[in-house]
Amino acid sequence: MKSALASETWRRLRANPAAFTALVVLAALLGMALIGPWISPYRAEALDWSQVAANPGAGHWFGTDRLGRDLFVRTLEGARVSMTVGLIAGSVSFSVGLCYGAVAGYIGGRTDEVMMRLVEILGGLPLIFFVIFLTVVFGRNELVLFVSIGAVGWLTMARIVRGQTLSIRRQEFIEAAVASGAGTARIIFRHVVPNVLGLVIVYATLTVPQIMLFESFLSFLGLGIQEPRASLGTLIAEGVGEMEAAPWMLLAPGVFLTLLLMSLNVFGDGLRDALDPKEHR
Amino acid sequence: MARYFLRRLAAAIPTLFVIITLTFFLIRLAPGGPFDEERSVPPEIMANLRAAYGLDQPILGQYARYLAALAHGDFGPSFRYKDFTVTELIAQGFPVTLTLGTIALTLALALGIPIGTFAALRHDSGWDTAAMSLAIVGVAIPSFVVLPFLGLLFGVHLHWLPVAGWEPASIRHLVLPVTALTLPPLAYVARLTRASMLEVLASAFVRTAIAKGLPLSTVIVRHALRPALVPVAGYLAPAVASIMTGSLVVESIAGLPGVGRYLVQGALNRDYTLVLGMVILYSALLIGMGLLVDLLYAWLDPRVRFER
């Protein structure tokens, strides 16, 4: 049954030209980020004082920056960092939201009320401030970045999972599990979670671009990834400073990030439409 | 309803209090202090400096004194901008940020709602696809990419508009930053309006209104629009939050003298009072917006009643 659902989803996805194009673009960007730095003769940290802020051309495909570093490699290495952050912080918020939402929805009653009230309060706070403070307080290292971004992303996920859990809580297979004497924790993780997973994964694909956007925003402000490492956000921040003299320093990472975020969003939308046609038109 | 409003207003105070408390202690946990860069200062003078700002007192005492001053509307002196109080700094910069944000929010609503409605009416046509593709662009591309790209095109290449800078009462300097700030909420509003309008258009009361011969424009404006706007009203508070966040970067890229820079700079410089002032300002704005949304709900949907 699972494979039937998967093949049906795949068929609907292929029938949606926008989503399919997005998937191809996404695959191309991923492929570039994975093998690009490997086929280029340049290293991301290598300085070349004879080639400072060089135009894009045969030697340096995307040009070089103020320190003569090759922008093709730097952009792709930056994209790797952004993608890694997106995946790791995405998984953190996904797991936390999944557990939290399933527990709240399954136990219900007072517990549910308190837990969801907390989500509501947190959702109403300007969380960006706290992310900024966390990075300032605990130093600007990447672990703090992952945790603080993940801490922001799980709220929506928890809401969606709770809603799904509520709708399956009263079904017979749960009753059967209760009747056969399974404990609450076992029911939640063996019976509830696997059954809400399908839709939740779709929303997770829409969380990843949001998280990448957030990471590049923080890096742009100088609070995220630190020199000599670079993410797309830091590269864009550098590019903005040089945009009149060396526009390619802005264009290379800016266009890459734009394409990446757009294809992820379009693909996520398409996936949601394919799996859950009534949710969104 | 007035009672409900007052209750909500009263409930906002503990929320604000929690935010202030969290911020106060979080920022104090950070290593370093506001006078770190003045390293040449002898220790005696440093001690005097710290005493002058009350930093030598126990932290709970400082906290109590801060709250007491705050209750009188005093945000305290800035630690970094010598001779300025936080109130003065905010009073100088906030009008710029407020102007920018208000224009952006107004534009997002004034353009997003008609675009979304239009797309819903022309569902599955080329117009619909075009509008929603544009909306995807707006949702996906962050304002710190949009603004430099616009600057590159209209400023550096075409020389139509200034890339950055600020002159009082100059609309030309506002065009690009406002555009960058408007696009994300505009795209969201258009998408939300379209989705809910599609739902409302399929409902029985719209069918009835059309069946009894009302012109389509009347059906939309008099009957369909109000219920369709409920989710848009719900998005208002996140929209304000997104515009605030956007203005942090947009102001710095465009070189506008707003308050956006104070938050990040203040946190990095350990300018405790300035950071707290900014957090209080932004949180109060957000909470106020939440209240406004509740009132809007009641106006848009007569079924909403203020109980308890």
Image (cartoon, rainbow, N blue to C red):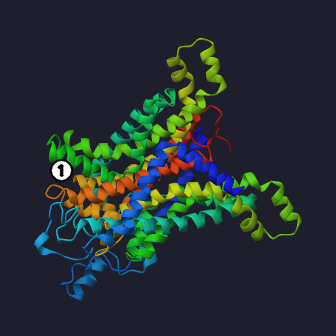
Chain ID of residue with mark 1? B
Task: Give coordinates of residue B264: x percent, y percent.
Answer: 33, 64
In the image, taking residue B67 as reference, residue B197 lies left or right, namely right
In the displayed orientation, state which residue is furthest to the top: B213
Residue at image point 36% right, 63% down: A32
Residue A6 visible somewhere in the drawing: yes
Q: Amino acid at mark 1?
A: Gly
Residue A230 visible somewhere in the drawing: no
Residue at image point 40% right, 71% down: A135
Residue at image point 44% right, 53% down: A24
Q: Which residue occupies the foreground of this view, A135 or B279? A: A135
Quarter of the image that includes the C terminus of chain B: top right
- Does B235 appear above or below A255? above
Task: Give coordinates of residue A49: x percent, y percent.
Answer: 12, 74
Residue at image point 42% right, 65% down: A83
In the displayed orientation, state which residue is furthest to the left: A50
**Secondary structure of residue under mark 1:** loop
Task: Give coordinates of residue A120: x percent, y percent.
Answer: 58, 56
Q: Which residue occupies the foreground of this view, B119 or B255? A: B119
Quarter of the image that includes the N terminus of chain B: top right
